[in-house]
Image (cartoon, rainbow, N blue to C red):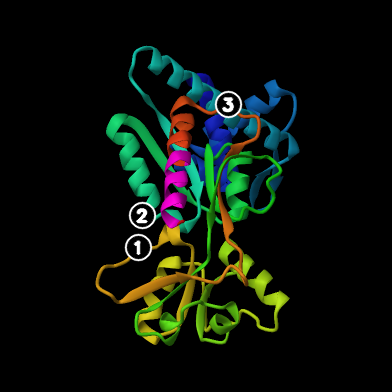
Amino acid sequence: MRHLQTFRLIEAVARAGSMRRAAEDMNITASALNRRINRFEDEFGAEIFERLAGGVRLNPAGELVLHHYRATLSDLSRVQGQVADLSGERRGRVSIACSQALLPYFLPQQIARYRAEHRGVTFSVNVRDRAQAEQELATYSSDLALVFEPVYLVDFEVVHVAPQAVNVVMRADHPLARKPELRLRDCLDTPHVAPSAKFGVRHLLDFAARRGTRRVSPVVETESFELIRHYVLHEGVIGFQIPIGLRDPGDGSIVFRPISERDLPPGNLILGQMRGRTLPVASARFAMQLATALKDHSGEMG
């Protein structure tokens, strides 16, 4: 569809912030790219880029143009999926923005399960924090978001909510592992590793700590939940995660248990899409599968 090529070039320039770098990315000359952009602006009747000393950036008109392009691609993908359904052949691309906790176990299992029946569908998995995931929906960069404790929910249409209790991750020989109930005060009085402030787990911990006399003061603060899982083995500290991102390793090295709900009520893992958007067929079907799987997972945890 050649008429979309100019929009692809505009998106490339916006992403690169430079005509020269965008031209290299798109494998055309900078002069040819500049002519295409100038011609579009003439036909469109307004400039869409601010020309700066160090490059270019979209102006408000350009932001609207790029949003229109992404919405058009979304609609086109939806129609292509519907046409494929007419012939009984499922095709399409599903893009999802998700929290790190979904990466080790849940999403690989769900994607493989879906592709076992629909080999023509491809996936794009974008790891985003809870604020970035909502932005991905608003800009049509992702069809779905699956995040723990999202921030705004302004343009977020909730498909399914799965409660997740914050768990303590620790070595099996850690003193807290023998306690019949894990209280937040005991956890925060123990050396701990915690996710950084932009993550939902940390948000819940900080909020609960402020109600008491303790505070979250990690010996290691990180954006990596994988680091948390591994670090507790080395120093004998504790870490914090949600159960959907945890599995028993089977060797007795690590245990994980929920913090008492008296101190820290469960947070919400939320599956959603952009409000009012009609999803492409493959994305809509995958969302239905995820909702069922999350419901089953919550039942297992209960």
Give the left or right position of residue 44, taking residue 166 as reference.
right
**Residue at position x 50%, y 50% from top?**
98
C-alpha distance separating marks 1 and 3: 35 Å
SS for callout 2 = loop
Q: Quadrant of residue 43?
A: top right
Residue 164 in the image: above or below residue 162 = below
Q: Indicate yes or no whether the magenta region holds residue 112.
A: no
Q: Which residue is mark 1?
A: 247
Please provide percent x and percent y for residue 87: 34, 12
Range of residues picked out in magenta: 291-301
Q: Position of residue 150 (x, y in %)?
A: 62, 53
Q: Residue furthest top?
A: 86
Q: Are marks 1 and 2 in contact (CB under 8 Å)?
A: yes
Question: Where does residue 85 sit, x and y in percent of width and height?
Answer: 39, 17
Q: Is residue 28 visible?
A: no
Identify the residue shown where x is 40% and y is 54%.
103
Q: Residue 254: percent from the left, percent from the top?
A: 34, 75
Q: Secondary structure at mark 3?
A: loop
Q: Which residue is mark 2?
A: 105
Compared to 297, does 222 lie above or below? below
Query: Are there few (<14), some (14-19), or many (20+) residues within 10 Å of tag 2?
Result: few
